[in-house]
Image: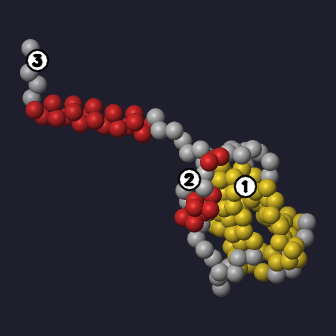
Amino acid sequence: MLNFSSTRRRTGLVAITAAVLLGACACQAPVNIADADVPAWKATALPEANGVVLEDSGKILNRDPLLKKAASVQAGTYTLTMACDGSGKAYFAVSSGGNKITDAAAACNGNRDIVKIKVPVTGPLSISTSSVDAPLIFAYHLAPAAS
């Protein structure tokens, strides 16, 4: 018969408990994006902003881009705040009057990504949202940059 000291038994028990907990966490099913409550997620993922000129949120279930347009946005400096959840990245292509201003991306890791954008002329503005890592949920808003 083997006789283990209480320290070795305690160490073994801790190791077994840790292994069981890690295994249980790894076996949990990932969040089902198709069933995600986008408005509830957006409320916690993206802070409200003053003066928002364009915003959108939703699900990207395939690789097709989603386009949101504003009829007229004043020339100036803006902040594009983006968030996504799922895996990979969401991409945001910003155009003004049909001319590309910038491309931006948000990592789907629970953090917000923020970029400053200069809109050169007053006029129509559009943001195309896409991902090669679908499915995922996303949200963004474009608001005047703080002075």
Q: Which residue is mark 3?
A: 2
Secondary structure of the residue carrying tag 3 is loop
Q: What's the residue type where badge 3 is placed?
A: Leu
Q: Which residue is mark 2?
A: 109
Task: Residue lying at the far right in this picture: please name it.
Answer: 98
Upstream in the sequence, badge 2 or badge 3?
3
Secondary structure of the residue carrying tag 2 is loop
Picture quadrant of residue 19:
top left
- Please report the residue visible at 15 percent of the width from the left and 30 percent of the height from the top: 9
Task: Residue lying at the far bottom in this picture: please name it.
Answer: 147
User: Number of labelled discs?
Assistant: 3
Q: Is residue 117 visible?
A: no
**Image side of residue 139 versus residue 15, left or right:** right
Q: Which residue is mark 1?
A: 91
Task: Residue lying at the far top in this picture: please name it.
Answer: 1
Q: In the picture shown, does residue 71 fall above or below 85?
A: below
Between 49 and 100, which is closer to the camera in this rendering? 49
Expressed as whole percent of the image width and height from the top left, the position of residue 8 reads 15, 31
How would you rate the neighbour count of disc 3 (Cα within 10 Å): few for under 14, some for 14-19, many for 20 or more?
A: few
Picture quadrant of residue 3:
top left
Secondary structure of the residue carrying tag 1 is strand
- Please report the residue visible at 54 percent of the width from the left and 56 percent of the height from the top: 110
Q: What's the residue type where badge 1 is placed?
A: Tyr
Q: Are marks 3 and 1 in contact (CB under 8 Å)?
A: no
Compute the Cα span from label 3 to label 1: 60 Å
Compute the Cα span from label 2 to label 1: 14 Å
Q: Are marks 2 and 1 in contact (CB under 8 Å)?
A: no
Q: Name the image quarter holding the C terminus.
A: bottom right
Q: What's the residue type where badge 2 is placed?
A: Asn
